Amino acid sequence: MGIPDATRNQLAVKFGVLFPHLDERQRRLLMGAEARAVAQAAQVSETTVRKGADELEACEGPLGRVRRPGGGRKKAAEVDPGLRPALLALVEPDIRGDPISPLRWTTRSTRKLAAELTCQGHKVSADTVGDLLREEGFSLQANAKTVEGAQHPDRDAQFRYINDRAKEHIGAGDPVISVDTKKKELVGDYKNAGREWRPTGEPVLVKTHDFLDRQGPGKAIPYGIYDLAANTGWVSVGTDHDTAEFAVASIRRWWQARGRYDYPHATRLLITADAGGSNGYRTRAWKSELAALASGTGMEITVCHLPPGTSKWNKIRHRLFSHISMNWRGRALISHEVIVDSIAATTTRTGLTIEAELDTGTYDTGVKVTDAEIDALAMSRHRFHGAWNYTLRPAGPCPAPHHETESAATTATTAHPAAPPDGVDTQALRDPELTGMTIAEPDALVDALIPALAEQREQFRHERRRRRGAGAKDKLSDADRILATVLCLRKIGTHDLLAQLFGVTGSTLTRAVQEARSLLAEHDHAIHPSTAGLAGPPQGVDAAVLLRSPSVESLSVESAHVVSASAAWASSSASASIRALSGSRPVNSRKASAACKTTMPRPSRTVQPRSRAVRSSAVSSGR
């Protein structure tokens, strides 16, 4: 590589003019000054300039790299072979290193890691620690919210069921809405997450603490309704309490302002909601208020709840609420009007539009709904998970119950005044609809567990020091014990109803279930709860015969009335076995007749007080 001719010519002219007037030493000084000027202009040493001149004279080709192979300083991991294992021991104490790590409970930043490694004798910088971690496949990771805890076994099936119901309603032109309560917002000059474009150095000034000002405007409670088919939303901004009454009032406002105009010919409404909160499936006031809404609109209202722990999959969360949060990010919600206007101004490129309204109504908390009021609702539970899926119909006249006359009831009770309940034919209770098994599986289960039951009984006698045959006689056979346990775990009916069907007391049934349940677990026999309850006569049980059985005659008047009503219902259809399972709720053996408010003389009998455990099991079964 040579010097350009123009540069060479300029230097030649300069030196040609000066050299004749200079001696030898002065010439050397001039050339040294020129070389120093070049080195200073390039910010390198004169030695580097001299080496560059030598390489130019050598005319070597380009090397393709700055340093020769093997040149430069060695990497820290190569100089110190123990550096990399020591670093991995600090960042992975539970996997590769010592669990008693000095940084186990502190932030593992590169600076702290470098300081700890230096203390251990491995001198290293924070940048080198970062390079080594990246070479080992590490990166900065945040927590990922993916662990959902225990999942219901029918979780996916419930999602598919909701999807099928939604397709059915949308295909028929009926509205399908998703409802939920958005996060409560503090009203006032409080910090709101997010950033907005503003002049530099002029942020919006807000309070330093997010403590609710009791003298201020309070909170805002946005309750949203999202129309899946129309891609529209409605938000009622409440100011009082998030109650079931407020939730249904918001749905009523949506229907009166938008729904009835968007769906003028609709006769049904499908609501998808979370499993908890003001619109949860356990909230009685929610069902009571929806029943009033159904009567006021004349529509059938079907509710399908998402399985517990899956509220993040609610459509309204990521199709409505997320866009509202992005629209008002970085903006102080100083008043309810600002909140309403911000919600109403929310749009998306896919065409989402939202209407918002301020609800200043008062909604009381702690409202109690009795069993009788729930039983009086025109509500039918679906065959699949009736606790999650149910339909409320407009209230109509209550059908006249089919029951025995007062004289017939008196005759029946006096005919068997002291006869102990013998129960019904347990063969009818082995129906696959009730046990969830095939016809042969109950027998196989009994054959497998009877030896274990006998061994358990002998061990009990040995602990109590009893002779064989001593003590009270078993009121339930081994087969009936196992069958009763299966029906109890399936939650086919209430605890009292099952006890009376088997002709035993509640405590006897409880002991039998406790004994057999442990054996089922030991032999890996999982009994899943049924998705329907026992509201009609079991298959194979003739309703008239069931009414004449001593077990039914010994029931309370309400229970006899329920069975008699089931008998009359069954006689009107060719299928008189388990048709009621497709749309009825589990029977409350004490209060089932409260819906029609019948009056019948109550025979004198001793009422067994229900324990809390029994009542909780009845509640979980759908009461």
Image (tube, rainbow, N blue to C red):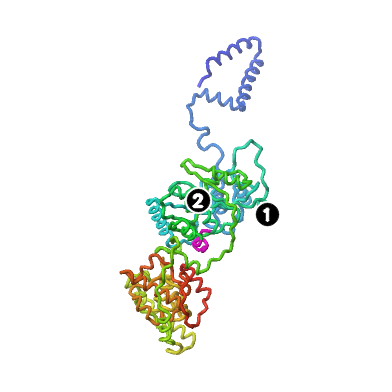
The residues colored magenta run 278-288
In the image, is residue 103 part of the stretch drawn in magenta? no
| Residue that label 2 marks | 254
Q: Amino acid at mark 2?
A: Trp
Residue 284 falls inside the magenta stretch = yes
| Mark 1 neighbour class, 10 Å CA radius: few under 14, some 14 to 19, many 20 or more | few
Per the rendering, the mark at residue 475 is: none
Q: Are marks 2 and 1 in contact (CB under 8 Å)?
A: no
Residue 181 falls in which quadrant of the image? bottom right
Q: Write down the quadrant of residue 574 in the picture.
A: bottom left
Quickly name the residue at label 1: 214
- Pick out the residue farthest to the left: 574
Of residues 273 and 374, the one nearer the viewer is 374
Answer yes or no: is residue 84 visible.
yes
66 with respect to 492 (left or right): right
460 is higher (above) or lower (below) than 33: below
Label 1 SS: loop
| Residue at point 66%, 38% (across, down) | 202
Query: Residue at position x 41%, y 52% from top?
Result: 266
Give the x, y percent position of residue 3. 53, 19
Q: Residue at x 53, y 15 (%)?
A: 5
The number of numbered discs placed on residues in the rendered structure image is: 2
